[in-house]
Amino acid sequence: MADFNEWNQQIITEFRENGGKCGGMFEGAPMLILHSTGAKSGLERLNPLMYQQAGDAWAIFASKAGAPTNPDWFHNLVAQANASIEVGTDTVAVRARVAEGDERQQIWSAQKVAWPQFAGYEESAEGRVIPVVVLEKT
């Protein structure tokens, strides 16, 4: 787990040093940093994530790179929907909601076309439906 946290921290540092942009495997990808509250700990948690613009909102994907379980940040947002995000050089207060039905399908399908690795995550997820979370400005 420490290695994953260190990797995330490197991405966060690069994001902040470059006005919200990252290189390497995230070169050209729309990135944000999610600030959520730990459901059990109550502590602030930071997660760098790819997003898709969804009108005036941001859609994020609980893919966990195709793991059979949802990421911790998803559980945190379900428990406490108020959060904030860093996008570019801005910090924005948001409220999270899980997209359902046609809305989820439309956003998810577009993500798989734009970033084909998400289709691979879906295949690897052992039947888990990958949640799409919409972050709306508050």
Image (tube, rainbow, N blue to C red):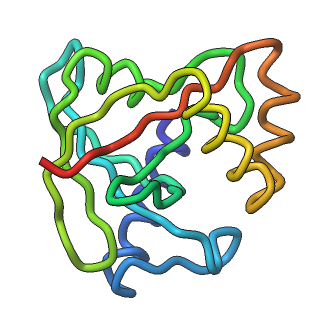
Residue 1: % across, % down: 51, 33
The front one of 46 and 58 is 58
Farthest residue, direction bottom: 18
Q: Which residue is drawn at 32% across and 44% down?
A: 135
Q: Residue at x 46, y 54 (%)?
A: 54
Residue 27: % across, % down: 64, 78
Residue 8 shown left or right of residue 104 in the figure: left
Image quarter of residue 9: bottom left
Residue 35: % across, % down: 24, 46
The front one of 97 and 20 is 97
Q: In this view, does 3 lie above or below 116?
A: above
Q: Give the total number of marks visible in the rendering.
A: 0
Image quarter of residue 130: top right
Q: Which residue is drawn at 18% across and 19% down?
A: 41
Q: In this view, does 75 lie above or below 29?
A: above
Residue 27 shown left or right of residue 137 in the figure: right
Residue 46 shown left or right of residue 73 in the figure: left
Q: Which residue is drawn at 33% across and 59% down?
A: 56
Residue 15 shown left or right of residue 125 in the figure: left
